[in-house]
Amino acid sequence: MADANLATPTDLSNDKTRAVAEALNGILADSYALYLKTKNFHWHVSGPHFRDYHLMLDEQAAAILATTDVIAERVRKTGHTTLRSIGDITKHQSIADNDEEFVSAADMLSELREDNLKLVETLRAAKEAAEEAGDNATDGLLDDWTDQAEERAWFLFEASRNG
């Protein structure tokens, strides 16, 4: 339970929202990990499709970052606390970092596509927790975030096709 100074009033059961908050904190950690990986690839992409990939990855990174504040604030609205540091993100993330010196553009697109699909799985699991808790607000937000992650995966897939 959060420190009394951080208590947030809610009509939802603390026991049920704990699972929602834990799921959202995992999503938040993965969102930051995916954001930084997407920016890393944006900065280091090279090859004949540089401009298209560079711009697409920048757009995707901005969209991912735009969700982070809403995710963290949703955790607080459920009466719990959220991530506090890079170390905290590292403890909660399931999306792996990529610190390789060079990654081909094709491998970048493939890895980000798989990471976005992994995020979709995490979002769907969080939706189950939100439904169980009767947390309609989180439930609705998760639908939007799932659609956004699916769209990113689709764009990455289409951009990587040979044709």
Image (cartoon, grey):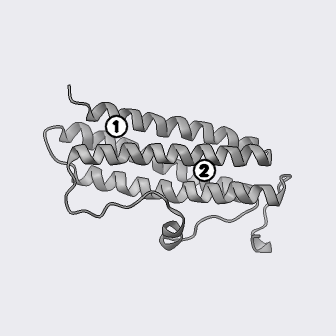
Q: Seen from this angle, which residue lies furthest left?
A: 48
Q: Is residue 55 above or below residue 72?
A: above
Residue 80, image x and y in percent? 72, 63
Question: Alpha-carbon neighbours of circle 2 within 10 Å: few (<14), some, or many (≥20)?
Answer: few
Task: Determine the secondary structure under disc 2.
Answer: helix
Q: Residue at x 27, y 35 (%)?
A: 160
Q: How many marks?
A: 2
**Viewport quadrant of the N terminus:** bottom right
Q: Which residue is tagged 1?
A: 156
**Which is more toward the observer, 162 or 79?**
162
- Disc 1 marks which amino acid? Leu
Q: Gap in Å between the C-alphas at discs 2 and 1?
A: 24 Å
**Which is more toward the observer, 90 or 77?**
90
Task: Determine the secondary structure under disc 1.
Answer: helix
Q: Residue at x 20, y 25 (%)?
A: 163
Question: Alpha-carbon neighbours of circle 1 within 10 Å: few (<14), some, or many (≥20)?
Answer: many
Q: In the image, which disc is placed on residue 70?
A: 2
Residue 42, image x and y in percent? 28, 50
Q: Residue at x 70, y 54 (%)?
A: 20
Q: Is residue 17 above or below residue 107?
A: below
Residue 44, image x and y in percent? 22, 54
- Disc 2 marks which amino acid? Val
Question: Which mark sits nearer the N-terminus, 2 or 1?
Answer: 2
